[in-house]
Image (cartoon, grey):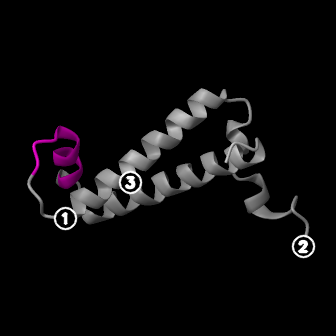
Amino acid sequence: MSATRGPTARRGQQFSQTPLPELLEALARARATLRLLEVAASSMPTENDELDRLRALGQPELAKLRRETLGLQTDLRAELRRRGEI
């Protein structure tokens, strides 16, 4: 199996020209969003506007946001691995 075949080898290439600090910041934001989604799924009361916004979403919207964020995180990590940063 060649490393240049298939979608896995192409993951994150849309970020190939993105400066490293921006990649790291985007990865941190994606991770923070995933943590917020985990907390939003719980019933813990908070005074966080972002959590309130997430809790107002329905299950399909939350699932879609989670999938999109996980995909973004995977792409960012793939580009960072290509660069030897992680």
14 left or right of 52 in image: right
Marks 2 and 3 sit apart, C-alpha to C-alpha, by 32 Å
Q: Nearer the viewer, residue 72 or 23?
A: 23
Mark found first going from the N terminus, 1 or 2: 2
Query: For residue 1, which numbered disc appears in the image?
Result: 2
| Distance (Cα) linking label 1 and label 2 | 42 Å
Q: Earlier in the sequence, mark 3 or mark 1?
A: 3
Q: Which residue is denoted by mark 3 in the rendering? A: 34
What stretch of residues is rendered in magenta?
46-55
Name the kind of residue labelled 1 in the image. Ser
- Please, what is the three-letter code of the amino acid marked with disc 3? Leu
Give the distance between the C-alpha atoms of the residues marked 3 and 1, in whole angstroms: 13 Å
Element marked by disc 2: loop
Residue occupied by mark 1:
42
| Three-letter code, disc 2 | Met
Q: Position of residue 56 (x, y in %)?
A: 17, 52
Answer left or right for 4 relative to 42: right
Position of the N terminus, as image quadrant, is bottom right
For image coordinates 44% across by 49% down, the residue present is 31
Mark 3 residue element = helix
Residues under numbered marks 3 and 1 in contact, where contact means CB atoms less than 8 Å apart: no
Q: Furthest-right residue in view?
A: 2
80 part of magenta stretch: no
Bin the neighbour count of mark 2 within 10 Å (Cα to Cα): few under 14, some 14-19, many 20 and up. Answer: few
Residue at figure coordinates x 51%, y 37% from the top left: 26
- In the rendered image, residue 6, in percent from the top left (x then y), is placed at 80, 64
> Going from the N terminus, do you reach mark 2 or mark 3 first?
2
